[in-house]
Image (cartoon, helix red, strand yellow):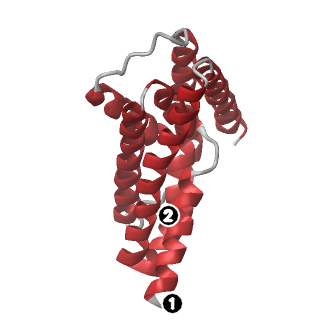
Amino acid sequence: MNVGAVALFGLALGFSLTVPPGPMNALIASRAARSVRDGVVTGLGAMSSDAILGAAVFLLRSIVDLGGVARPIYALGAGVMAFLGVRLLRAAPAPDVAAAAPAGRTYLGALGVGLSNPFQILWWLTAGLASAYLGGVVLLLALFGAIGVWVVAFPAIIHLGVRRAPRVRVVVRYVSAALVLVFAGYFLVLAVVG
């Protein structure tokens, strides 16, 4: 593969991780409804968790057999997602009451959710690990470039929609909470059934 093809493949992989609806995008959307900054900081927390998970997978791939960790990962993810979904439901403000949260708390919360998100963990154990062998540094730079674009563009788009129709803020938060709770249930089923 030439460098251009590797870079395009890396961009495609990055968007395959970030664009599909999931718990992290639900969290980013709910925070972006408050402010673009909160959405971007949440996205940066998710991006940092990807960097940590990616580094861990690459370091552990030759040392540890990772085959038996799926059920505990799903169980942990189910618990985190259920907690997050309930918090989102309980904290849904009226459309005119939306203060930005402290950036550090927003970032650390998203980092924690990302590090316990089964989709992110399993993505890194599968597609992420496979990509390490395909394109090395160029691929990883392109992958994180795609993630960077998403964590800025997605919150800006959500916030713009909320500014044009302020009542959308409540809808975004409730839909986000419902989506996160659905994923909590899904992860719980996977943890039990395997």
At 62% from the left and 23% from the top, the residue drawn is 168
- State how far apart marks 2 and 1 are (Cα): 17 Å
Which amino acid does the dot numbered 1 rest on?
Met
Q: Secondary structure at mark 2?
A: helix
**Whole-percent x, y for residue 65 in the image:** 47, 60
**Whole-percent x, y for residue 177 in the image:** 61, 23
Q: Nearer the viewer, residue 114 or 101?
A: 101
Q: Are marks 2 and 1 in contact (CB under 8 Å)?
A: no
Residue 13, relative to residue 105: is it above or below? below
At 35% from the left and 28% from the top, the residue drawn is 106
Pointer 2: what residue?
128
| Rendered image: mark on residue 1 | 1
**Whole-percent x, y for residue 69 in the image:** 53, 47
At 57% from the left and 46% from the top, the residue drawn is 119
- Counting other residues with Cα less than 10 Å from the Cα at mark 2, is it few (<14), some (14-19), or many (20 or more)? many
Residue 9, relative to residue 25: is it above or below? below
Q: Nearer the viewer, mark 2 or mark 1?
A: 1
Q: Nearer the viewer, residue 85 or 159?
A: 159
Residue 47, relative to residue 78: is it above or below? below
| Rendered image: mark on residue 110 | none
Q: Secondary structure at mark 1?
A: loop
